[in-house]
Image: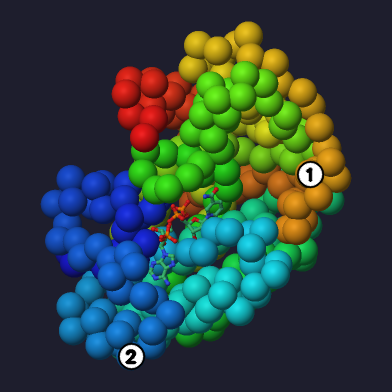
Amino acid sequence: MHIVICGAAGQLGSELVDLFKAGGADVSGFDLDMDITDYDLVMGSVPPLKPDLVINAAADVDADGAESDPDSSYRVNFTGNQNLALAALESVCPLVFVSSDYVFDGTKGEAYSEFDMVNPQSVYGRAKVASEVYTAAVARRHYIFRTQWVFGRYGRRNFVKSIIRNAREKGSLKVVTDEVGKPTGARDLAGIIARVSTSGRYGLYHATNEGVCSRFEFAKEILAAAGMPEVPVDPIMHCDLDLPCPRPPYSPLDNMNLRLQGFPGSRHYSEPLAEYVRWLTDGNMD
Ligand SMILES: NC(=O)c1ccc[n+]([C@@H]2O[C@H](COP(=O)([O-])OP(=O)(O)OC[C@H]3O[C@@H](n4cnc5c(N)ncnc54)[C@H](OP(=O)(O)O)[C@@H]3O)[C@@H](O)[C@H]2O)c1
């Protein structure tokens, strides 16, 4: 099986490369060396490889920056995926697109399933919805995975690493209480994507670890796992931060379709968190 993975240097893409290679697949990984926004480059690079599966794990995840520069965000998060959908169509193979809880407004008051209506409140969220719709329309065989609060060994940034670094450098933290979701380990997420995207059961899936918390609660758990439970954390509200991108206040994703289709359940996020923090504090902070 030959798999093309875009965003292969990111948190999720790197784990997917590792996992598929370990499973014996032939993997072509691309990141900024194949700019997915370049139609000619994508069409000239992907179909000649004759892939059996194209995975789009590339994204511009700067949701705040997207509010002041929407073109840049839509170019990667919509047009880039459009190009990969067209490349998958040309290759006569399925496409994997990775979406986000930002497709929801976060006002439902309970977890969102795949059967809830989307209502994005931000440029990043609208780009994800547009890409989901485009993927479903153009890549006839497709898998769409919505996830949230991803952390892992690879990539440039994540919340867990930021909390530990800020605790060490500043000695105290302020973290929001009015953002609630499900932290998700990148390796666990890659496991779900690898399992489902080779099953032939095309469709839309919510894909997270289990366990719901606020950013504030998650920060306290991260500090405890890192052996710094004494670091003071002040609860604040999003309005105190004045960030350009509105976050969904309560957007845990219920992995309902995975459950309905009989796929195995996910671990609680505390397990991948403990593994990751152990790895980070074992000399891998930089
Ligand atoms: N991280 C989260 O909490 C989260 C939550 C919900 C959904 N998601 C979605 O999950 C997927 C994977 O996220 P992630 O956390 O793995 O993100 P990530 O670590 O930022 O990885 C994305 C990769 O794509 C690369 N990239 C950016 N623009 C590109 C372009 N034009 N062409 C090719 N590659 C490009 C990035 O390079 P640079 O780093 O150099 O820009 C990065 O290596 C994305 O679709 C994201 O929207 C993530």
What colouring style does the render use? rainbow
Quarter-of-image position of residue 279: top left
Residue at label 2?
40
Kindly identify the residue that appears in the image at 57 percent across and 43 percent down.
149
Quarter-of-image position of residue 66: bottom right
Camera-nearest residue between 147 and 136: 147
Kindly identify the residue that appears in the image at 81 percent across and 32 percent down.
236
Disc number lying in front (2 or 1): 1
> Where is the C terminus found, in terms of image quarters?
top left
Q: Is residue 40 above or below residue 26?
A: below
Badge 2 density bin: few <14, some 14–19, many ≥20, Cα 10 Å: few
Camera-nearest residue between 70 and 139: 70
Kindly identify the residue that appears in the image at 18 percent across and 51 percent down.
21
Badge 1 density bin: few <14, some 14–19, many ≥20, Cα 10 Å: few
Give the number of callouts: 2
Percent coordinates x, y for residue 12 in the rendering: 40, 50
Where disc 2 sits, the SS reads helix
**Would you say the beta carbon of the disc 1 residue lies within 8 angstroms of ligand 1?**
no
